[in-house]
Image: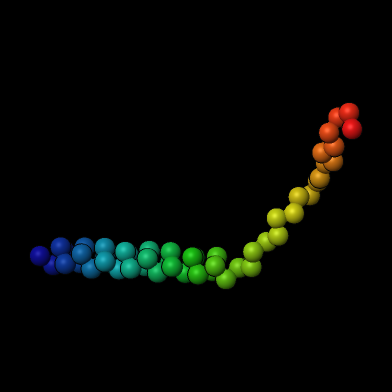
Amino acid sequence: MRRLLAAAVTAALAAALAVGTALGVVTALNTTPEQPNTPLISYDTARPGR
């Protein structure tokens, strides 16, 4: 019974740690400013014959 309790407590702590880590990563990504979507190279798109 003692081993079962230790295993259950360990699993619960691991799950709590995983959830906390996931929430921390999401929070860190949300606070990072959005990067501008500007292309490094641009090509003229003129129509041929005009």
Way the structure is coloured: rainbow
Q: Residue 12 in the image: x percent, y percent?
A: 26, 66
Q: Residue 37 occupies which quadrant of the picture?
A: bottom right
| Outermost residue, right side | 50
Quadrant assignment for the N terminus: bottom left
Question: Of 46 and 17, which appears nearest the observer?
Answer: 46
Q: Residue 32 occupies which quadrant of the picture?
A: bottom right
The answer to whether residue 39 is left or right of residue 32 is right
The answer to whether residue 36 is left or right of residue 32 is right
Q: How many marks?
A: 0
Quadrant assignment for the C terminus: top right
Residue at the spot x=47%, y=69% of the render?
24
| Outermost residue, left side | 1
Question: Of 4 and 30, which appears nearest the observer?
Answer: 30
Question: Of 16 and 37, which appears nearest the observer?
Answer: 37
Q: Residue 38 in the image: x percent, y percent?
A: 75, 54
Q: Is residue 13 above or below residue 46?
A: below
Q: Is residue 19 above or below residue 37?
A: below
Q: Residue 36 occupies which quadrant of the picture?
A: bottom right
Residue at the spot x=38%, y=63% of the render?
18
The answer to whether residue 45 is left or right of residue 30 is right
The answer to whether residue 15 is left or right of residue 8 is right
| Outermost residue, front side | 50
Q: Residue 20 in the image: x percent, y percent?
A: 40, 69
Question: Of 37 and 31, which appears nearest the observer?
Answer: 37
Residue at the spot x=68%, y=61% of the render?
35
Residue at the spot x=15%, y=63% of the render?
4
